Image (cartoon, rainbow, N blue to C red):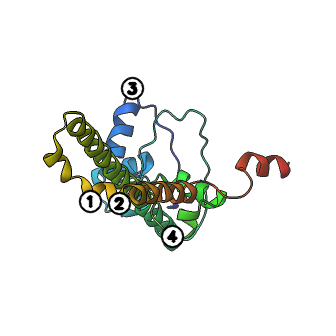
Amino acid sequence: MDASSRDRLSVDLHGLKAALLDRARELGVTPSGFVRSTLAAALGQSLDLDADRLTCGSPGGRGDRVRLCLRMSSEHARATVAAACDARMPIGDYISGLVAGVPVLSAGGSRGDHIATFVASTAELSTLSRNVHRLTVLLRQANVEPARQYRDMLDTLAADVRGHLELAATVLSDLQPQGRPAAASARRGQ
């Protein structure tokens, strides 16, 4: 029998599908890749599992999603997977973001880094809020000496809040698709 890279065989899993999907997700490989590597090991053959490391995110609860198969060179596939992993996104979401023109993805940035920057700025703003609240309590109690330590914070309060809002606007803008919405583009092509 001729060996082909696209040999197919359908198997009734008899209730093992959920466990198979969970284990493949844990290993960061496609379910097919997991089955291939397990069969290769059982048959005493070696198999490059890295070629099947195509799931960076964990799908879940997305019933409206469909499968799209792309053919590209192994090198381009590895580069696409690496870029999606660097962005901390599932590959489909990453490619959809590129198609939609999400600036942070188009510029080769990391969505995760942008979000982390926004979260850190929000945490600083939260600390600032707590400090203003504490200062308000001290002033209501006419407790002037402990309130003086907040003087420097008050001097930069407006600039700190403005800086956070500018950062938030930039991050949110960089994470949004640019141009026409995908649905409008799809209707235009029909």
- Residue 68 location (% of width, % of height): 62, 50
Circle 3: element type? loop
Label 1 CA crowd tier, 10 Å (few <14, some 14–19, many 20+): few
N-terminal of the two: label 2 or label 3?
3
105 sits to left or right of 35: right
- Say which mark, if any, is on residue 152: 1
> Nearer the viewer's eye, disc 1 or disc 4?
1
Label 3 CA crowd tier, 10 Å (few <14, some 14–19, many 20+): few
Q: Which residue is mark 3?
A: 15
Give the camera-side residue of 41 and 15: 15
Q: Amino acid at mark 1?
A: Asp
Q: Amino acid at mark 2?
A: Thr
47 sits to left or right of 59: left
4 sits to left or right of 37: right
Give the camera-side residue of 79 and 70: 79
Q: Which residue is mark 2?
A: 156
Label 4 CA crowd tier, 10 Å (few <14, some 14–19, many 20+): few
> Nearer the viewer's eye, disc 3 or disc 4?
4
Q: Is disc 2 in contact with disc 3, using a CB cutoff of under 8 Å?
A: no
